[in-house]
Amino acid sequence: MAAVLIDDQACARLIKRFGEDVASWCDDLPALVARLATRWGLTVVDAKPGNTGRTLICVGDDGAKKVLKLTPDHTIAESEAAALRAWDGCSRVVQVLATELADGAILLEGIDPGTQLRESGANVPWAEVGDLLTQIHSVTPPAGFSPLEDRVTFMYRLAERELRGSVAEATLSLETLDRARLRALDLATSGGGNSIVHGDLHPGNVLDGGPGRGVVAIDPRPSVGDPSFDLADWVTLPMTEGGTLEDGLDAIAPHLPGFDAERVRAWCVALSPLSVIRPLERGERTPFVEAMLSFCW
């Protein structure tokens, strides 16, 4: 049975993100995939959900697993490809096989088994995560990347749009969100480094590459600035299992040269509202949500 390239639910998510005009992109997607599959020798075997496009799991004519990513926003594909090209040869980052940026398309190597690290619970391979962070932050940024300030502004603009008028606003006010935004902008503009920042390095965007490869990062939203930004989703991870922020800081610190605990802690506080809006919309008041809310005030 052929994979469903896009369904009504996936199209609705993209329309919510990009607007009604993206409906025509959804309609044209099968023809685009057919053309790229012919060019690159691909057979699509599965499709993965996403908020900015479609991720198609493929098998190449050479029998190798490959991943075809497509987005209606070509700037997303361009910035992702630029970051992955800058990290070319980094073992902890997925490698680019080909691009067709005029179509918003990137062809990537397949990662096996490809399990997301968020499915590993408390079993975080901290040494490998530290090596991943060290690899990506050690690369000299090429010209053309936007500053981290722009990424922060974009993230909080999306968060405000999602929060305004939602059930989560009864717990997390727009004023609280704005205070956090100002904290994050202050951190982004006050120095702290000049690295390529992944920008979306949560455990869902790090895959298990098996015993010979270890953890592998995917889906960057890159900018240039303070590398401590990329640590927030990691040092708060033990809090989802009943631990503390200090547990997370202590777990990663031995694996990162020059680790700045205070700056990482400050980023956790500044970004804390972003991790609770969707749980609050679902009515979740877990210990993790309560702990993150306590950072917001």
Image: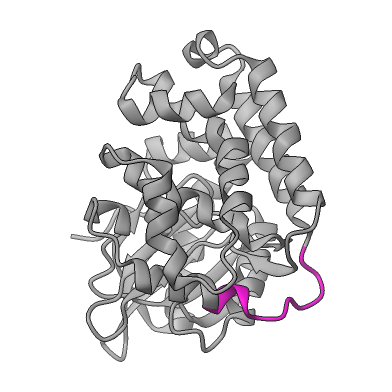
Q: Does the magenta stretch include residue 248?
A: no
The image position of residue 211, as x and y in percent, is 22, 81
Q: Which residue is drawn at 49% across and 24% down?
A: 294
Q: Which stretch appears magenta?
A: 135-145
Of the pair 197 and 105, the residue shown nearer to us: 197
Looking at the rendering, in which quadrant would you find the C terminus? Answer: top right
Quarter where residue 240 is shown: top left
Q: Is residue 71 visible?
A: no
Of the pair 285 and 208, the residue shown nearer to us: 285
Q: Does the magenta stretch include residue 139?
A: yes
The image position of residue 253, as x and y in percent, is 46, 64
On the picture, is 99 further left or further right than 107? right
On the picture, is 35 further left or further right than 66? right
What colouring does the structure picture have? one colour
On the picture, is 68 further left or further right than 183? left
Of the pair 106 and 37, the residue shown nearer to us: 106
Q: Residue at x 72, y 36 (%)?
A: 183
Establish if 61 lies above or below 16: below
Q: Which residue is drawn at 26% across and 41% down?
A: 241
The image position of residue 82, as x and y in percent, is 66, 74
Q: Residue at x 48, y 24 (%)?
A: 293
Establish if 68 lies above or below 173: below
Establish if 165 lies above or below 292: above
